[in-house]
Amino acid sequence: MNETDKPLRADARRNRARVLEAAEEVFAAEGVGAPTEAVARRAGVGIGTVFRHFPTKEALLEAVLVERMRGLVEHARRAAGDADAGGALFGFLEHIVEQSASKNAYADALAGAGVDVSGVFAGVRDELFAAVEALVLRARDAGAVRPDVGPVEVIAVVVGASHAARWAPQPARALAVAVVLDGLRKKC
């Protein structure tokens, strides 16, 4: 077992979680180019603690991105229990679109540093796909989604909606996203 395979002590787990939370806040406020020192200050830890958990800034960005993806998985799983299956799916998709700008900033920064971004998602990709699939199937069974739509199409559409949101000016953004997502709805 190497050093990264050892379970973390409780205090180390707390510090790691504080660093990740602080990184989210700092990068949201200052952009992904913000210095790691700002993350350490926000977390209330020394820079050595940050680097002990995340040896490079790219490792920190990767961890934040993976945590965001895990958050999406949990959001989708919670939404799967909603009584309104269509509302749960479309609410989740709107949440993804809202999160896409910052997710893309992380991904772009990592890709610019030569990191294989698709490899970063490898561990959580299947979980997210399964969670989206459950939402889509429930919404389709409830008649809220077209019968020919599955999770692959939904993911493709949400990527398109994310790009629409990226380029649409603020007053038109919500309408642009709604227009894109409406293509998934079952027509009466």
Image (cartoon, rainbow, N blue to C red):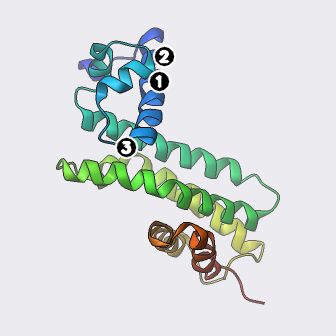
Count neighbours of disc 3 (C-alpha within 10 A) and say few if under 14, some if 14 to 19, many if 20 or more. some
Closer to the camera in the image, 113 or 155: 113
Closer to the camera in the image, 52 or 38: 38
Callout count:
3
Residue 102 in picture, x, y percent from top left: 44, 51
Rendered image: mark on residue 115: none
Count neighbours of disc 2 (C-alpha within 10 A) and say few if under 14, some if 14 to 19, many if 20 or more. few
Query: On the image, which quarter does residue 56 sit in?
Result: top left
- Structural distance between the alpha carbons of marks 1 and 2: 5 Å
Residue where numbered disc 1 is placed: 17
In the image, what residue type sits under mark 1?
Answer: Ala
Residue where numbered disc 3 is placed: 31
> Residue placed at 60% from the left, 63% from the top?
93
> Residue placed at 50% from the left, 50% from the top?
127
Toward the right, the furthest residue is: 83
Closer to the camera in the image, 12 or 160: 160
